[in-house]
Image (cartoon, rainbow, N blue to C red):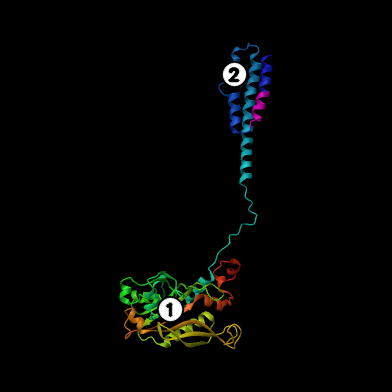
C-alpha cells in the first residue's frame, strides 16, 4: 500500500475518532492520537524528509490538508460537545415558571391568644402594664396571702395540683413561707400574681396579668384542666368601687359591644371585699332572654371586687393609705361567649378545620 493510500485510511480513521468522541475527554484523547507529539498525523509530517523528492509536493500537500481537516473537525466537534452539555444542563435544571407555585400555609394566632391580646389592648389603652407570674406557685401566693382560710375547699388536692406536697394546707403562715416551707402547686388562678406585683412594685399599680392556670378537672364541654385568665390589679390612693365600675364597664363594652348593659352581682372571693360577678346584657337577644343566656338576659363574664385590706397587709402595702380593686377574666369564657363555642375542648385539640375559622 502506497503512502497516499495510508493517508486516505488515516483520514477515515481521523473522522471516526473525532466524530465518535462522546465527551470532552474522548475528544482530547483523539487530538493527542492524531496531532499530539507522537500523533499519527504529526508522524506523517515528520516522514516527509524521507520521501522521494518528486513525490514530496503531492504528499506534503495531502498531509497538510489532512492536518487542517483534523484541526477543523476537532474544533467543530468541540463546539458540538459544549452545546450538547449546555443543552443537557438546561434540560436537567429547567424550572417551569408557569407552573402554579406550592403555596405555603400561613399560620395565625390561636383564638385564645387573639382574645388575650385583645384584652391586653383594651387595658394598655388606659395605661395598664402587662405583667407575668410563675405557673408553679406556693400555697402562700395562690391561697394564704390572698386571705383564703386554711380550710378553704379549693386548697384540697381535689381542686389543686400539688407538685410538692408538705401535707396540703398545713404550712401557710407568713413566717413559714419566709422559711421556704410552703406547699408547691400549679397555680389555680392568676390572682397570686397580685401578691408578686405588690412585693416588687410600690403603688400606684395598674396592671393586668394574662396566663395559664390549672385545676384537676376532667376535660368536658365546659371545663379544661388547663385554661387561661387575665388578672387585673389596681392599687392607688383614693380608689373606690366607682373606679372598679367605670373601668369594667369600659372593658365590657370594648369587648362585647358599645350597647352592652352591665350588672354587678354580689358574690364572695376571699381576696376582695366587697366582691361581685360582672354580667353583661346578652349580645344574642339584647337582654330579652334567649337560650344563649338561659333566658336570663345576662351573661356572667368575670369576678371582681375591692382588694381586701388583709391582702394589702400581707403584701406590705399600707391599707390606711391605699385602696384598690381586682378582677379576673376567663379567656376561654370570653372566647366561648364571643363565638358561641359548644365545647371548650375544641380549643385544645389543634384541629385546623376548627381553628382556621377564627
Ligand atoms: N381568681 C378568681 C377565680 O379564679 C377570679 C377572680 C375573682 C379574680 C375576683 C379577682 C377577683 O382578681 O377580684 O375564680
Give whichever of 84, 213 is nearer the camera. Answer: 213
Q: What residue is disc 2 on?
A: 43
Q: Crowding at label 2, few (<14), some or many (≥20) Cα neighbours within 10 Å? A: some
In three-dimensional space, the C-alpha distance between marks 1 and 2, rounded to whole angstroms, equals 101 Å
Give whichever of 208, 193 is nearer the camera. Answer: 193
Please indicate whether residue 44 sits to the left or right of residue 241 in the image: right
Magenta span? 12-21
Residue 336 part of the magenta-drawn span: no
- The quadrant of the rendering that contains the N terminus is top right
Q: Is mark 2 within 8 Å of ligand 1?
A: no
Q: What residue is disc 1 on?
A: 232
SS state under label 2 = helix
Hey, which residue is sitting farthest front in the picture? Answer: 167
Give whichever of 311, 172 is nearer the camera. Answer: 172
How many numbered marks appear? 2
Residue in the image at 63% along x and 21% along y:
64
Residue 272 position within the rendered picture, expressed as x and y whole percent measured from the top left: 41, 84
Q: Is mark 1 within 8 Å of ligand 1?
A: yes
Q: Splitting the image into 4 quarters, where does residue 198 fall?
A: bottom left
Amino acid at each position: 500500500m502506497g503512502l497516499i493510500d495510508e493517508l486516505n485510511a488515516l483520514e477515515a480513521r481521523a473522522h471516526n475518532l473525532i466524530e465518535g468522541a462522546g465527551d470532552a475527554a474522548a475528544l482530547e484523547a483523539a487530538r493527542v492520537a492524531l496531532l499530539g507529539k507522537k500523533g499519527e498525523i504529526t508522524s506523517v509530517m515528520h516522514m516527509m524528509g524521507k520521501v522521494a523528492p518528486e513525490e514530496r509536493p503531492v504528499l506534503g500537500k495531502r498531509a497538510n490538508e489532512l492536518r487542517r481537516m483534523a484541526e477543523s473537525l476537532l474544533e467543530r466537534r468541540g463546539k458540538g460537545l459544549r452545546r450538547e452539555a449546555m443543552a443537557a444542563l438546561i434540560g436537567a435544571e429547567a424550572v417551569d415558571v408557569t407552573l402554579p407555585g406550592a403555596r405555603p400555609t400561613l399560620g395565625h394566632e390561636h383564638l385564645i391568644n387573639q382574645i388575650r391580646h385583645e384584652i391586653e389592648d383594651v387595658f394598655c389603652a388606659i395605661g395598664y402594664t402587662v405583667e407575668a407570674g410563675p405557673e408553679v406557685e406556693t400555697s402562700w401566693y395562690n391561697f394564704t396571702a390572698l386571705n383564703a382560710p386554711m380550710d378553704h375547699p379549693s386548697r384540697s388536692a381535689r381542686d389543686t395540683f400539688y407538685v410538692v406536697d408538705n401535707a396540703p394546707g398545713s404550712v401557710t403562715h407568713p413566717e413559714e413561707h419566709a422559711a421556704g416551707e410552703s406547699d408547691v402547686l400549679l397555680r389555680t388562678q392568676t390572682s397570686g400574681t397580685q401578691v408578686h406585683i405588690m412585693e416588687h412594685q410600690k403603688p400606684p399599680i395598674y396592671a393586668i396579668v394574662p396566663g395559664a392556670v390549672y385545676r384537676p378537672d376532667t376535660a368536658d364541654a365546659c371545663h379544661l384542666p388547663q385554661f387561661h385568665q387575665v388578672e387585673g390589679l389596681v392599687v392607688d390612693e383614693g380608689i373606690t368601687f366607682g373606679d372598679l365600675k367605670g373601668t369594667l364597664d369600659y372593658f365590657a363594652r370594648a369587648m362585647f359591644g358599645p350597647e352592652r348593659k352591665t350588672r354587678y352581682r354580689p358574690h364572695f372571693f376571699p381576696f376582695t371585699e366587697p366582691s361581685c360577678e360582672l354580667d353583661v346584657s346578652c349580645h344574642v337577644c339584647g337582654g330579652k332572654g334567649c337560650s344563649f343566656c338561659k333566658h336570663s338576659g345576662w351573661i356572667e363574664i368575670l369576678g371582681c371586687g375591692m382588694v381586701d385590706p388583709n391582702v394589702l397587709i400581707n403584701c406590705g402595702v399600707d391599707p390606711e393609705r391605699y385602696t384598690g380593686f381586682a378582677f379576673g377574666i376567663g379567656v376561654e369564657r370570653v372566647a366561648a361567649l364571643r363565638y358561641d363555642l359548644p365545647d371548650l375542648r375544641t380549643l385544645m385539640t389543634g384541629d385546623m378545620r376548627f381553628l382556621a375559622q377564627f
